[in-house]
Image: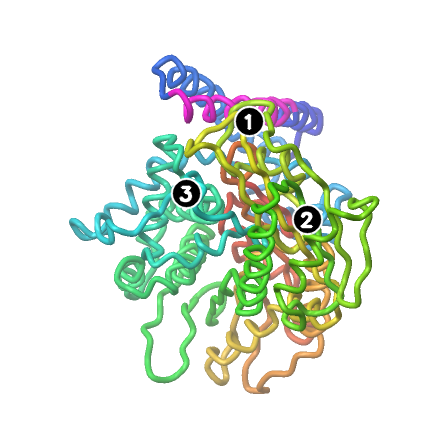
Amino acid sequence: MSGDPEKFRELMAEADRIGAELDAILPDLAAARAKYFKTRAEADQRELDRIQEIASATMRRYSALQPQLRAATGLTVDELEALLERPKPTEAGVDRVPRSALTVDRVKTTALMDELLPEALRSLEALCPPGWLEGQADVDHQLTDLADGTAPLSLIKGLRPASELTPLHRFRQMLRCARDFLKADAGYDHFAGATLLPQLAQLGSRLGYLNEVGGNVQDRLDRLHQGPSEQVDSVVFELLVAEALAEKGRRIEFIGETFDPTPDFRCYDPFPMFIECKRKRALSDYDLREEREMRAVYDELHKLCAGSRLHGLFSLHLSREVFDVRPSDIATVLYRQRLAAHPERPLVYDWGTVSFEEKPRTVTLPSSTKMYSPNMLRYVFGWNSDLPDWDGIICQVSGDGDQVVDTVSDPLALQWNNTSHVALRKRAWSPVDLVGSAMKQIPAGEFGMMYLCYHEGARENVADRRVQDFMERLGEWDHSSNIRVPLALLVRLYPRALGQGQPDLIESNLRFVSEAYGEPEMFSMFPQSLFTPSGQARRSNRYG
């Protein structure tokens, strides 16, 4: 079958035009959702539904072009997939390895959350026993503590520790968070939702593929609500891999756990092998320990500023680990910065530098928005949720108890980063430890493949150093000579809330092939996009 180059060019041009339409619609969709958050008026609900339908229709037009594009190439499905998934150092001239290449303006949207989430939510709710979802009713899953001003917002690696460490069972949190988002509930936790909603949408919308998977699939599904809360994200990852493998046509089965180390899957084609999945916890012990120390600094600073009615943004660059300095000493120096001739210019101390930018007591926002939405954080404190310049921020404003605000008062924030060698080394931990854990699960004398996953929310140089360290250490990795691991996929997740708080997830994956017994072409037989719609190798896909 021969291709039609002219038709292919026309279709590609049309795909680019539709993609531009979609990018133009998304801000209107976010604005309509934010307006309905505030008014709950029927007219605003109708406007939100109208724009949502336009966005969904545009995405359907985009999807409809895909089979036409494939036909215009003159290639079979297998030939096209093999071509698209061949390893490439860049995609369209863009190197997708650096953190700076993974931002909302550089990665196109490939799926709409509002379109997939309703049915996915219904499918996953149906897995729960009657009354289970209503359990732990006394545990709050919303952002009420922020709206009433009783607690500051703390973000580290783009995550809110209070959302990640909630006593609420993780699967309950996921389902309740999705309900809040679909109802346009102003209390929706957009910090948790950035991670939870995309994986829920992908998992729930593809459950049918699990019918093609052997072994005790029901046991894995039951673990979502019966297993420990801290294991839910790992179970979700295993199920996403299973769905993707089945969609790719691989014949697999879950392997039951025994007292001996066992991998997650047995794969029977195109050749016998085992597959192991590992997902790292989003916040490390070091992240949490540092955040607790910075909270202590902020609490001391807040007391000092409250007494003098001082408002503004304090910036702290540490050249030593924060644990080496007493929180009260740092807070005292930060507070004293207001007296400098030019407080916005950093002053140097033996443990770092400090600066201060005073803010007015009352800040009028450009438009109504959720409390602590990315829009509000950017406007009041200059915080970039898409690509943070800092390790973390702790901040507080007053909105008179409202969930949606157009004016805030008493703004106070502390943002920090740490450039010490020790802190950088610990913050840029390499996910290579996932390799060691996965290797141990592969039985002796067998071939294996690894799917490794971690959350990346650090600033650019920390994120890039992490990948560099991983690639260097992987090249030096030794494992038992009686196993063979020809392929590994490193799944990098970049979940963050954008704009008015809408969830957005970028998935950017790196492929690794053993020089001794692996071939790049082998990747065409296995899925390479798990949390987002499938795309090209090393491509970054987005839920928007």
Decide whether residue 63 is among the magenta residues. no
* Residue position marked by numbered label 2 in the rendering: 314
* Residue position marked by numbered label 1 in the rendering: 26
Q: Kindly state the secondary structure of the residue where label 1 is placed.
A: helix
Mark 2 nearby-residue class (10 Å; few <14, some 14–19, many ≥20): many
The answer to which of 151 and 434 lies nearer the viewer is 151
Instruction: Tell me which corner region of the image, top left, top right, bottom left or bottom right, holds residue 183.
Output: top left
- Tell me if residue 80 can be seen: no
- Residue type, numbered disc 3: Leu
Foreground mark, 2 or 3, reads 2
> What's drawn in magenta, residue-wise?
17-39
Q: Kindly state the secondary structure of the residue where label 2 is placed.
A: strand
User: Where in the figure is residue 322, as x and y percent of width and height?
Assistant: 65, 67
- Tell me if residue 4 can be seen: yes
- Residue type, numbered disc 2: Phe
The disc at residue 143 is 3
- Residue type, numbered disc 1: Leu
The answer to which of 361 and 424 lies nearer the viewer is 361
Q: Residue at x 64, y 39 (%)?
A: 381
Q: CA distance from mark 1 to mark 3?
A: 24 Å
